[in-house]
Image: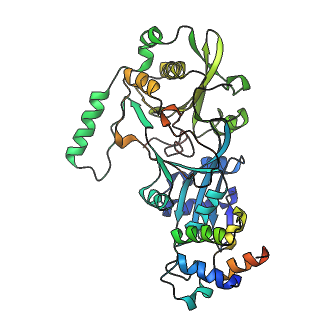
Amino acid sequence: MPLVEYRPEHFELIAETGKTAEVPALLHRAHTDYYYTTSPHAKLYFSTDDFKSVKAMIAVEKMPFLFGETSVTVGFGHHWHSLQPGAGGLLFMHWLKSCQIPMEFGGSDESHAFLKQSRWEYFEGMHTYLLNPRYRTHSGDSPVVKLAKWGWCKAAMRPPLHKRLDEIRSVAPKGLEVREERAYTEDLLPRTSPFTVRFHPDTEYLNWRYSLNLSFVKYRVFRLLLSEETIGYVILNEQHNRIVVSQCDATDPIALAYGTLLSVAEVGKSGTQRKEIGLVSSFPAMQEIYMKFGFVTNQRLDRRFALGLQRIKFDMPRDTTQWLLNYDWGDVVFRPPFLDEKEV
Amino acid sequence: MTTREKLIQCFSAVLPTLPLEEIPDASIEGTDPWDSVASVTLIFAVEEDFNVEIEPEDLEGLASFEKIYRYLESKGI
């Protein structure tokens, strides 16, 4: 059962598999080719005998993390589908063996059933927060559920952050400023950190994963300055009708939370429409700041977070209230409609 | 106990419903109880029982009893 690493010439086959396995992101050529073929950090693998059909596939983004002082390669697995019994197991093992700690953040009920059988460890406390959530319904929602969702969105509606700049500045650390940058540079990266677990990319990784020059997704990066000294950065993903706090890091969690609000406000200034803002946090002091400015959360928004820790040989910090989590890891925001597609 | 006998024992523990005489012919494609969970359990069991670390690039070749047996042989086991 040959295992093949995706290359652009396999697009038609993978797009066909994307249709069968209901993974619409794989039907978008610019995204698929960029994400899986332009760096060593993310690869899509599939097994096939004849290049006419795919038996199983999996994608893994290898992300550099710091767990305490220990550098660890975390493998963010996604698009794991077995189209023939047994075939997915070998690809799953490939995922486990291609990194030090495999991670699932989100994922289907089916994959979590498998991870539970494989004795992965689940972590709690990481919540998704939304400001001005969009009204979303699913085909199976009853009229009562639809009404409840509408009511929840309506009740959660707040003025956009760019209209609350004075309020944010009045409670933010004195001297905190944000400045949009045109490139990722070394000095943006925090050298010390209050967080015990965090994604720790270098500028080469950021320039690839959160490239400021992609056709299908728009990233913007902001420098965080405290009394004119750089303390970190915030990367935002600006979409048709929402803004996602993709990745951020700083030497101080409070300044980071307010810096995130200020960065979102900067992006909001240029638009006419009130956009939904999404972010993830497990750090209580940051969560409190977000909620104070109108961000809401509920269990249905949260994504399950699991790590395969069977093989680690160090004491890892397990208290998630000290971790720095971010929204846009792995393939999480790479969903249609992409920026170069029509909004649906 | 020979490597082949030990591998049959390993398969039998992971796929208990598979008759012993069918184990040497077992493969992912032709053996019902060999599903994704069994694949993972089997690889872990082989690594533990034969004290071998299987490299990611070798996994694709391990889709049948015979192939796993030949892999172990190639490792001098």
Front one among A150 and A42: A42
Residue A14 sits in quarter: bottom right
Farthest residue toward the front?
B1
Residue A217 in sight here: yes
Residue A86 sits in quarter: bottom right
Relative to B25, does residue B61 appear above or below in the rendering?
above
Please say which color scheme the image uses: rainbow
Q: Position of residue A175 (x, y in %)?
A: 57, 8
Farthest residue toward the left?
A144
Quadrant that contains the N terminus of chain A: bottom right
Quadrant that contains the C terminus of chain A: top left
**Left or right relative to A145: residue A94:** right
Relative to A171, does residue A31 appear above or below in the rendering?
below
Q: Where is residue A295 in the image (x, y as percent from the top left)?
A: 38, 27
Q: Where is residue A173 in the image (x, y as percent from the top left)?
A: 52, 11
- How many discs mark residues in the rendered view? 0
Residue A222 in sight here: no
Q: Residue at x 56, y 66 (%)?
A: A88
**Left or right relative to A232: residue A337:** left
